[in-house]
Image (cartoon, rainbow, N blue to C red):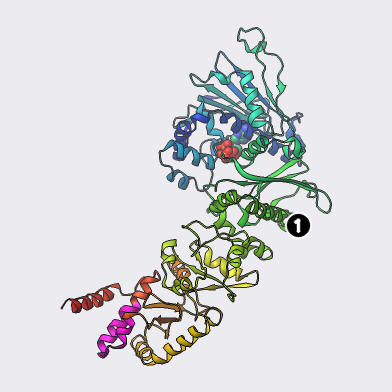
Amino acid sequence: MTAASKETLGFKTEVKQLLHLMIHSLYSNKEIFLRELVSNASDACDKLRFQALTNNDLYESESDLKVDITFDKDAKTLTIADNGIGMTRDDVVNHLGTIAKSGTAEFLSQLSGDQQKDSQLIGQFGVGFYSAFIVADKVIVETRRAGESAEQGTRWESEGEGEFSLESIEKAGRGTSITLHLKEGEEEFADSFRLQNLIKKYSDHIAIPVFVQQDSNDDDGEGEDASAPEAVNQAQAMWTRAKSDISDEDYKEFYKHVSHDWNEPLTWMHNTVEGKLNYTSLLYIPAQAPFDMWNREASRGVKLYVQRVFIMDDAEQFLPAYLRFVKGVLDSNDLSLNVSREILQQDKQVDSLRSALVKRVLDTLEKMSKKDAEKYQTFWNQFGEVLKEGPAEDFANREKVAGLFRFATTQSEGTEQTVSLADYIARMREGQKKIYYITGENHDAVAASPHLEYFRKKGIEVLLLTDRVDEWMVGHLSDFDGKAFQDVTKGELDLDELADESEKEEQKQLEESHKALIERLEAALKDDVKEVRVSSRLSDSPACLVVGQYDMGGHMRRLMEAAGQKVPEPEVALEVNPSHPLIERLDQEADEDRFAELAQVIHAQAQLAEGSQLKQPAQYVTRLNKLLLDLMK
Ligand SMILES: Nc1ncnc2c1ncn2[C@@H]1O[C@H](COP(=O)(O)OP(=O)(O)OP(=O)(O)O)[C@@H](O)[C@H]1O
């Protein structure tokens, strides 16, 4: 080792922030550091086994993979050593000096300083290696990549305060050993009994044997007197065990290992299939959305194993993007051990496996929605918006996915999305053939829309769609259970279906008796709207705007315009309510200039009511002020 090979580097800012936070927010759960370090050690062994498939020399004549936990009570140290893949000097800098996760900055910006809330968020982010600093004031990592020579080892050392040092060392055995210098008061972790209990509690499911040093019999504290270590965990891939042998606690801990989530999962599905396809899958639905669910680069997919050998993390080919919240393991007996991401893209088996997993997840959700509505509601509140991408992405399952949707409606309470399409259909009025909906920015705005007046009067339920994906989703769904979706703000209301005879007659008469008014309005607004009609949808408001049945809705148009996209101008019709006092008064206005002014104000108000921006707001204010002044005279 030469002095020149030693250097001191600073942590990236986000690491400093995370370390500070971790130590303060996670202290009450400090023991989880062991789970995190053993989980990393197990992953490192998995990776070595995978790479050794094509290069057996990597085993360096030691193919029994294991994790060794040793301690020294006097020195107050604890060491977690593995003989896995190890790290090069560059790996060490990249993995233990930065956080390479996409969305890290965004995650950190969400933190509030409130320890309770923040610990929840860190849980979703994943705690990892840095959790060692919850109990240690100095951490030393000694590592050597499998296949490299003994002199190419690296020693990383840090007190968790801004910087770390690196130097080259000689390391005979490959792999990584992490030594924690325990903080004052954390001596409990240099204790065999305590360590064994923790491994049984948190890491029993790890497929690699974990050995914990025994306490020495004569209590002189000499490390050399310790007797031979023994494997503490079951050391068998958990998903290969019989379901009856696996406790809920085991399933939950395994979830934390595969997902890097700190919270418990909402539910899981564990299945072994033999026949045309041969595989075992253990899939989890989290209880909480991860911090990066909307980040396009975020990793997703299952951990793929072939015949118990780890192949890759985040195998995204096995689940569609709209199920990206699902975590877990797929162990296939059919795929080849040298399968790669490229091969997966063309493999026919992959499609069959994917269909099978999708079916499993959708069936599980359906069952949950029937058996445990409250639990399902938790799921929906977290992941509903993602699931709504389903009809566009997975045409074959669109009806099944839509059956899982929940909506806020004109008849549901508050803003929570609780009504299924089946509920809606069961409540449809006699003769009603369509599923009516309205889209908009937020619940209050859509619930107050003038377009709902007629539906309220007739007691017809309307779905209130306020998620960004909604309009896009309905566009792809188009119908459910044979009933078409209809935007209540689009096209002429089809009274045939909704109104009784007397209403239709009344509407006809209104149209006849207001022909002159309509013509005058059309002349006054000829540059603004394509058509003016007598409305059948309004009862309390004077007017509203309606786009063509096949035009883009107002909400979608606003979203696209906000994203800087050019959107074709829709052909808008103004519908007026002749029974409204304002329109009655307008009809009597003899002065054509004043009539035109009033018509412009009514048109502007209809735009405001639907949430649109006026093209010339100042002009509207001037007009309105003029009218107000007239009133005050
Ligand atoms: N024992 C080890 N052997 C080899 N590489 C390791 C070991 N421990 C950590 N690493 C490397 O350091 C990286 C960072 O580890 P860390 O635990 O912080 O994050 P992670 O495991 O990727 O995810 P998470 O933070 O969600 O746990 C790992 O991805 C791995 O590449």
In the rendered image, residue 596 lying in the magenta stretch gets the answer yes
Give the residue drawn at x 53%, y 33%.
130
- Amino acid type at image mark 1: Ser
Q: Nearer the viewer, residue 582 or 152?
A: 582
Instruction: Categorize mark 1 by other alpha carbons within 10 Å: few (<14), some (14-19), many (20+).
Output: some
Identify the magenta region. Answer: 582-603
Residue projecting furthest to the right: 275
Where residue 282 sits in the image (x, y, percent)?
Answer: 70, 45
The quadrant in which residue 260 appears is top right
Q: Residue at x 25, y 86 (%)?
A: 594
The residue where tag 1 is placed is 352
The N terminus - image quarter: top right
Q: Quadrant of the C terminus?
A: bottom left
Q: Is residue 620 visible?
A: yes
Instruction: Name the image quarter holding residue 444.
Output: bottom left
For this rendering, which residue is in front, 164 or 207? 207
Q: Is residue 328 visible?
A: no
| Residue 153, placed above or below residue 542 | above
- In-image side of 305 versus 545 (left or right): right
Q: Is residue 407 magenta?
A: no
Is 126 rendered above or below residue 143?
A: below
Residue 372 % position (x, y)? 62, 49
Give how far across and how far down residue 347 sits, in percent: 75, 57
Q: Name the main secondary structure of what is drawn in magenta.
A: helix
518 up-or-down from 264: above or below: below
Along the line of sight, the residue nearer the viewer: 75 or 36:
36
Counting from the top left corner in percent of width and height, residue 603 is at 35, 79
Residue pushed farthest front?
502
Q: The residue tagged with tag 1: helix, strand or loop?
A: helix
Asked if residue 229 lies left or right of residue 493, the reply is right
